[in-house]
Amino acid sequence: MATILRDLSYRYQWLYNSISRLAALTVGGEARFRQLALEGLAIDPETRILDLCCGSGQATQYLVQRSNCVVGLDASPLSIRRSQKNVPQAEFVEGWAEAMPFAAEQFDLVHTSAALHEMKPDQRRQILREVHRVLKPGGIFTLIDFHQPTNPIFTPGLYTFFWLFETETAWELLKTNLVSELEAAGFINPQQMLIAGGSLQRIQALQGEK
């Protein structure tokens, strides 16, 4: 059942958008959810940003409001086509997050939203190393993803969502210390903030020396 609903949500944009909007109510709506990772960051029109695993551009549309230099990367040709239609102000590139088609030290900021839970552990760790590689020295990696709730009131809702729409990689992420994985990949001073009863985590980390 999870696989059927998951496939349908990616096949039909209206269904995916409806699910996203419903889930985002826990943090005050979709607009706030899409910008949670950007809170507290200094971004100007010349900040070069990579929206990693950009999907159909749901978060990219907010990035282009703050920077004129936004690139979206996704492995799905369908998502890239949707992104190009939805956010024509950005550049979009088809490619794998664990083997990005970019030279080293290309971006001031790498952003990803609710994507790492889709990855197997080895794949996720390789992605973190790739993010570190493409960031400029002193650049920032900011992410939003799931976390094991610290408030038990949020547990039934998160688990139901997982049972309906996610796979074993999402459950695995709940047991993972992403801060430790970022440090192992070379990032320094990861700052973690728990949101929505701990069911979401935002982490912002600096690229350390290579």
Image: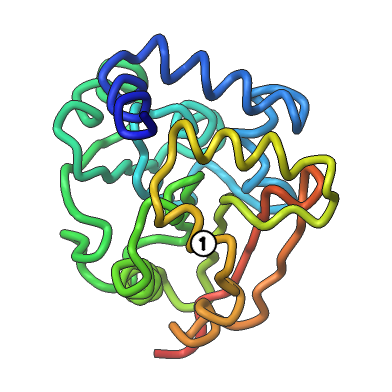
Callout 1: few (<14), some (14-19), or many (20+) C-alpha neighbours within 10 Å?
Answer: many
Position above or below: 13 against 53: above
Looking at this view, is 6 or 53 the one in front? 6
Position above or below: 168 against 86: below
**Amino acid on which disc 1 is placed:** Leu
In this rendering, position of residue 78 left or right of residue 109: left
In the rendered image, which quarter contains the C terminus? Answer: bottom left
Which corner quadrant of the image does residue 58 belong to?
A: top left
| Residue at left offset 39%, top offset 29% | 57
Q: Residue furthest top?
A: 14
- Number of numbered labels in the structure image: 1
- Secondary structure of the residue carrying numbered label 1: helix
| Residue at left offset 43%, top offset 48% | 115
Looking at this view, is 36 or 61 the one in front? 36
Position above or below: 64 against 148: above
Position above or below: 13 against 40: above
- The picture places residue 158, in percent across and down from the top left corner, at 64, 40
- The picture places residue 43, in percent across and down from the top left corner, at 60, 48
Which corner quadrant of the image does residue 107 belong to?
A: bottom left
In the rendered image, which quarter contains the N terminus? Answer: top left
| Residue at left offset 16%, top offset 43% | 94
| Residue at left offset 27%, top offset 36% | 91
- The picture places residue 133, in percent across and down from the top left corner, at 33, 75
- The picture places residue 84, in percent across and down from the top left corner, at 25, 23
Which residue matches tag 1?
A: 173
